[in-house]
Amino acid sequence: MKVIGVLPVRYASSRLPGKPLKEIEGLPMVIHTLKRTQLCKELDEVYVATDTEKIYALIEQYDGKVIMTSDKHKTGTDRIAEAVKDIDCDIVVNIQGDEPLVNPEHISSAVKPLLNNESVNVATLLCRNDRFGDATECKVVLDKNDDILYMSREDIPTSYFEKQKQILKLYCIVPFRKEFLLKFAAWEQTPLEKIEHIEYNRILENGYKMRGVVVDSVAESVDTPKNLNLVRNLMKKDKIKELYM
């Protein structure tokens, strides 16, 4: 099977304008994500999909493969679907460009369910934390087969009756079978997807399953200045960056 990684990256961000170019340890954030993704042995090729000339030029500057896409996409997954439609591959891994601490081994862990089980069309990484009440984090609950039941920006499951010590959060490394990705992109946005602002609820609302893969990680997506400061501090002690810096 041919497995490729695609980073959907846009310059505009309401909470942190220009975030792909924010500097971390001397490199733009998106370059950290790209370089770390390129270290994953499971991926045959890695691309960046963007709608911004500035990002396109930056990726070329660092010798990355980059594809220009429409600026009309509402989600990153829709963007990568456009990017890969003419690429010969079997599995497409969506690696959010704002995951500068992504671990290459975790990308491999996310892909394995699709390589080992032909009935799995899409999966995602998950990790545990105790950050309750943070709407920037997407929380997840699983069934007994590790398939996702629901995703929300509210804390789930509830602590109303019994205090929860930890919650599962989305760690945005999401492998799709290419055929299923193109099907996903053809669907209209769904009500819960819009309410939660989590595109993967579109999969659940259309009656399909999404496998969850729990890993031990301090995964921190950068959505706000607070996230960025935290990542800058974590990157100082990070060992993976020594492999590409």
Image (cartoon, rainbow, N blue to C red):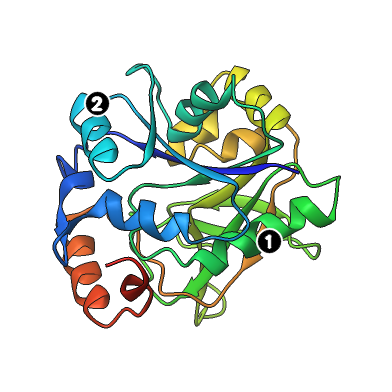
Q: Nearer the viewer, residue 54 or 212?
A: 54
Residue 24 shown left or right of residue 238 in the figure: left
Residue 183 lies in what quarter of the image? top right
Mark 1 residue crowding within 10 angstroms, few (<14) / some (14–19) / many (20+)? some
> Residue at label 1?
142
> Residue at label 2?
52
Number of dots carrying numbers: 2
**Residue appearing at x 60%, y 26% in the figure:** 87
Q: Position of residue 55 (x, y in %)?
A: 24, 34
16 w.r.t. 207: above or below = below
**Residue appearing at x 71%, y 36% in the figure:** 90
Residue 12 in sight in this render? no
Q: Earlier in the sequence, mark 1 or mark 2?
A: 2
Residue 178 lies in what quarter of the image? top right
Mark 2 residue crowding within 10 angstroms, few (<14) / some (14–19) / many (20+)? some
Identity of the amino acid at label 1? Leu
Foreground mark, 1 or 2, reads 2
Q: Quadrant of the N terminus?
A: top right
Residue 34 shown left or right of residue 158 in the figure: left
Q: Position of residue 9 (x, y in %)?
A: 33, 37
Q: Nearer the viewer, residue 63 or 35?
A: 63
207 w.r.t. 218: above or below = above
Furthest toward the front, the residue is 63
